Amino acid sequence: MMEKLVTRFRAVFGREPDIIARAPGRIEFIGNHTDYNGGPVLGAAIDRSVWVGLSVRTDGVRRFASEVKPGVVALEASGPLERLSGQKSWVNYPLGVLAAMRDTGVLAPAGFDYMAASDVPLGAGLSSSAAIELSSALAFLEATGASMDRESLVKLGRKAENEFVGVPCGILDQGVSGYGRKDHLVFIDCRGPRFDTVPLPAGSNFWIFNTHTKHALIDGLYAARHQECMEAAKVIGVTLLVDATPEMLAAAEQKLSRTAFKRARHVIDEIGRVSGAVSALRAGDLGSVGKLLLASHRSSRTWFENSCPELDFLVDSLEAEAGVYGARLTGGGFGGAAMALTSEAFGEESGQRISDAYLAKFGSRPEVIHARTGDGAALVKGSR
Ligand code: GLA
């Protein structure tokens, strides 16, 4: 990937990138919609990243290019930081980071040539957006010589996503991209937030099945779920659902709208499942972990209503396949991808069988990815 980035950088800008940074995509392992409710979540950084190359310019012009989008977007550094639309909208990620740096008083570079390249599949629920935010942030910081601790870096990426890109996401995506570690899961207690890693038992394998489906109203649906959770917390009498117990939910059932009750039921149970998964992982009990993944998916389907027929079909088919411990939708839902935790007994042929069955039912193939875990965001080439 790095070679591809450098070749493209040379072709477009006629020079070398002085700085190179990368940040990985992520799998949401378990903890569905728990993050913005202050709960815990487990994720894994994958061995695919968004790469950013950057060289400073002295004329105050910021030129953005991407290996996957046509053209170069040139903006005056002295001009206002405004959201772009259409073909150029991908630039909102690095622009969002620059806006977040400005708003938090961190020095940002004025002029530069910027190139992004990625082997994180786009729109697959693997958080290429958090990956481009963190890799951009590392490159910008290196360009001005500013330093930032990991937690502030993660928060900067989330601020860009929340305030500039306009998605009210929690800390999961940026947290896992920032704190990822090969052969480990990242545990985030989202209220702190507090970050930790949990070793993956040997022989754990991840398979991703990207449906390429995306609900047309996905952003609105995510925001609506967020809203419904906050409404439930208010009626139950807590600030965030992490402070509500199953008993408190039962006691408040009559006062809650049916929708708010269902959303809270999912989140409160899911918080329990994350704790259960951490214990089972530490005990090396992948069978129990798998059962929790399946229970998580069922809860998404029934209570949170963020699954869809394609994801349900994948999870049901995977559950019946040899070598699968468990499977569930991964990420926000309403389309996107399902993931399976498997043993070595699940291989390319098993993936092919799932893909064939999916093709027969839905008329197209899912993208099948055997994902390996990888390390978190890092500066690869510095200018100093
Ligand atoms: C998306 C968001 C995350 C998280 C998940 C659901 O991936 O970006 O912050 O809320 O959905 O768990």
Image: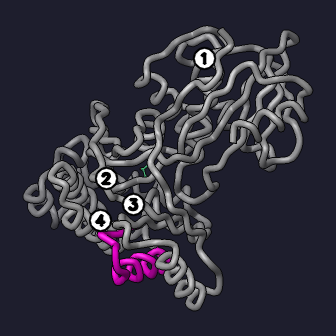
- Span shown in magenta: 308-328
Q: Are marks 4 and 3 in contact (CB under 8 Å)?
A: no
Q: Amino acid at mark 2?
A: Glu
- Camera-near label (4 vs 3) is 3
Tell me the colour scheme of the image: one colour
Q: Are marks 2 and 3 in contact (CB under 8 Å)?
A: no
Quadrant including the C terminus: top right
Q: Are marks 1 and 3 in contact (CB under 8 Å)?
A: no
Q: Residue tagged by mark 2?
A: 231
Which mark is on residue 307? Answer: none
If you read the primary sequence from the N terminus, does the residue marked by circle 2 or circle 4 appear first? 2
Q: Residue tagged by mark 4?
A: 293
If you read the primary sequence from the N terminus, does the residue marked by circle 1 or circle 2 appear first? 1
Instruction: Measure how far apart labels 2 and 4 are at the Cα level.
Output: 27 Å
Q: Residue at x 68, y 13 (%)?
A: 383
Kindly state the secondary structure of the residue where label 3 is placed: strand
| In the displayed structure image, the side of residue 339 where residue 69 appears, left or right | right
